[in-house]
Image: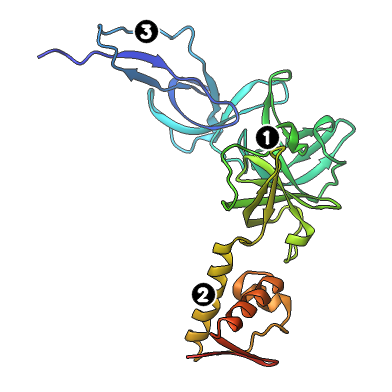
Amino acid sequence: MLPVLFKKSVLMINIGKINTLRVVAQYPFGYALAPLVEKTDDGDGVIEIDDADEQQTVTLAIDEVKASLAEDQEVEVFVATDQRGDLYATMKKPLIQVGETKVLKAVSATNFGAFFEWGLDNDLLVPNDYQAQPVNPGMYYVVHTFFDDKTQRILGATKLHYFLKEGSAYLSEGDTVECLVYAKTDLGFKVVINEKSLGLIFHSDAFKPLKVGQATEGVIKTIREDGKVDVALQRVDKGGRDALQQAILDDLEAHGGISTLTDKSAPDAIYSHFNVSKAAYKKALGALYKQKKITLSPDAVRLIK
């Protein structure tokens, strides 16, 4: 029986990410950690790679560890950079990793940038050049993190268009998406879609209150010729209209065939019950009335059986 043949390859450390690393040495001040070794079957012999002198390592301080670590033990750490750009490992889990876009709190501002809480001892720097507007300490902002090759540091940015595109090939009209509001304009609310791309909710489609930093579910309404994406808070196609009409009928069935939620009810009451705008609800009631499935009065909607 032929032996299983392997070739070893050393994985890289992902800066600004949570890594699973192995202990390769212990010092009085901490542990040296290196990437795991991945084995792949190449079918032409066993090749042992001596990477002791070339392997990438990062130090985990001794006070970060509650119990002693053994050589070759695997440990999950976040790899960060200090103010000089040097790597270090920490057992702390940050609020955000490189490539992600999250809501963070600003804690201080200087003449060269602002600092944000992100779960580590050293706050996250957002340089002035990467700020969409001056940052006020104590307020929350939508921040994207990245690794800056020039400074060799993990930095943040509130100028999201530097890193996220306005539009994406993976989106289609009618898709349900997760949105994060990051700015308010005269046209509407700018949003991050699925943490991958940028879009806009027009004021006319924002039937519920929205504010910067708020997460909300949305539906891709339109993808324009230039690729930019318009988002709605509810489905506006036939499928959405049919679903709302059926939801109204189901609600009437569940409540003895009567509802006090009429076309005269407050928008907030309609939204809290059906998660739609008052305009959409009125259209659905009108359609059901024309189909002779309900009767309408100033104080009640009744199911026709």
The residue at which mark 3 appears reads as 49
Q: Earlier in the sequence, mark 3 or mark 2?
A: 3
Residue 201: x and y in percent read 73, 54
Distance from the alpha carbon under mark 1 to that under mark 3: 35 Å
Amino acid on which the number 3 mark rests in the picture: Ile
Residue 72: x and y in percent read 38, 23
The residue at which mark 1 appears reads as 145
Instruction: Give the SS element for disc 1.
Output: strand
Q: Quadrant of residue 166?
A: top right
Distance from the alpha carbon under mark 2 to that under mark 1: 43 Å
Q: Earlier in the sequence, mark 1 or mark 3?
A: 3
Where is 236 relative to 295, above or below?
above
Amino acid on which the number 1 mark rests in the picture: Thr
The residue at which mark 2 appears reads as 246
Q: Give the mark toward the camera: 3 or 2.
A: 2
214 or 236: nearer the eye?
236
Residue 14: x and y in percent read 54, 26
Label 3 crowd bin: few (<14), some (14–19), many (20+), radius 10 Å: few
